[in-house]
Image (cartoon, rainbow, N blue to C red):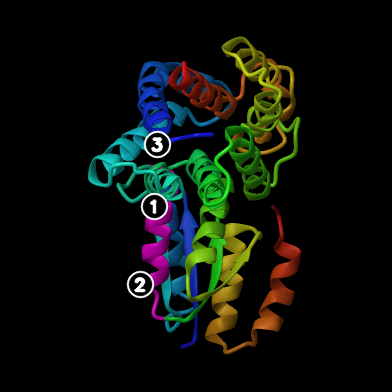
Amino acid sequence: MAMGILLVSHVPAIASGLQTLIKQVAKDVPITTAGGTSDGKIGTDLDHIQKAINDNPASELLVFYDLGSAKMNLDIAEEVSDKQMHVYDVAFVEGAYAAAALLEANVALDKIEAQLKPLKVK
Amino acid sequence: MLNVETLTKWMTNFENRITDQKDHLTELDRVIGDSDHGSNMERGVNAIKAAFEKTPPTDDLAQDFKTIAMAMLSKVGGASGPLYGTAFLEMAKLAKTDTDFGDLVEAAAKGIAKRGQAKPGDKTMLDVWAPAADLIKQNKLTDDAIDKLVEATKPMTAKRGRASYLGEKSVGHIDPGAASTGELLKAYLDARA
């Protein structure tokens, strides 16, 4: 599949919990996570995010994150990555869930983005 | 003009200052943030130290700044990682053609504003970086002037970063990122002395 999902959270359990939730509706969508820092602490760092980008078999990623520093690290990761990334400033759980369900149903990106628009919270 | 001797001393002083001030930075962050600024900054300066042990600084200041930036970006698990990382990356870019310290700090301030989408007065580290660049250019940057800039974040209401969730409750407290930026600038003044 060309498109995958990347989840970035400050806490490992939040990222993996959300992955468990959305796998239920999107079992064929490649999903990778960067929860917490590289050494398992609360926070986000560039190394961990880059690993999750590279580990995802998709070449185009729909990206969802929780709080501010995740977004800043994502911006930097996006600047240096070869993959095409779409970072959405939407509600983390609802946004990722909606996008995953729509990707699973082979809905086109512009339609997915239209669905995400009202979920913008940051 | 910045040279490799001053840069090396500057970073050693910064490491020492952060290690000394670690608990103070965490206490500032406990009040209006998530209590990790001291330990995050300590991880950052330790990463800079380790990176310079592996790749010692040379006359190529652009490369030296890049080494510092990558250390901060990789190892600091907080907003300070991407913000300091961006600051040093911007200095790396400029240092290829211009090593005037005021110009370097100005470039860093612009990068921080863009990365954090912050404006002056938002109660962030930008409130020290941006005016400090002006003071350096006027040859007026002193320890006292730095303290004043850091203190000036106290009455501000946080508009960006974790403290922004507190709104009015953030008034009356120094911004932790402003405080660590103050240490960085004092470390530079000590290196030049």
- Are the residues flagged by discs 2 and 3 in contact, CB closer than 8 Å? no
Name the chain letter of the residue that bears numbered label 1: A
To which residue does mark 1 refer? Answer: A13
The residue positioned 37% from the left and 33% from the top of the image is B45
> Dot 3 lies on which element?
helix
* Element assignment for label 1: helix
Quarter of the image where one finds residue B152: top right
Q: Which of the labelled discs sits on residue A55, or is there none?
A: 2
Q: Label 1 crowding class (10 Å Cα cut-off): few <14, some 14-19, many 20+?
A: few
Q: Do discs 1 and 2 share a chain?
A: yes
Q: Is residue A44 magenta?
A: yes
- Determine whether, in the image, residue A80 is placed left or right of residue A86: left
- Badge 3: how crowded within 10 Å, few (<14), some, or many (20+)? some
**Residue stretch in magenta:** A42-57
* Distance from the alpha carbon under mark 3 to that under mark 1: 44 Å
Query: Label 3 belongs to which residue?
Result: B4
Q: Nearer the viewer, mark 2 or mark 3?
A: 3
Answer yes or no: are tags 2 and 3 on the same subunit.
no
Q: How many marks?
A: 3
Q: Give yes or no for residue B90 being in the magenta stretch.
A: no
User: Is residue B158 positioned above or below B74 on the image?
Assistant: above
Residue at the spot x=52%, y=52% of the render?
Answer: B96
Q: Position of residue A41 (x, y in %)?
A: 35, 43
Q: Amino acid at mark 1?
A: Ala
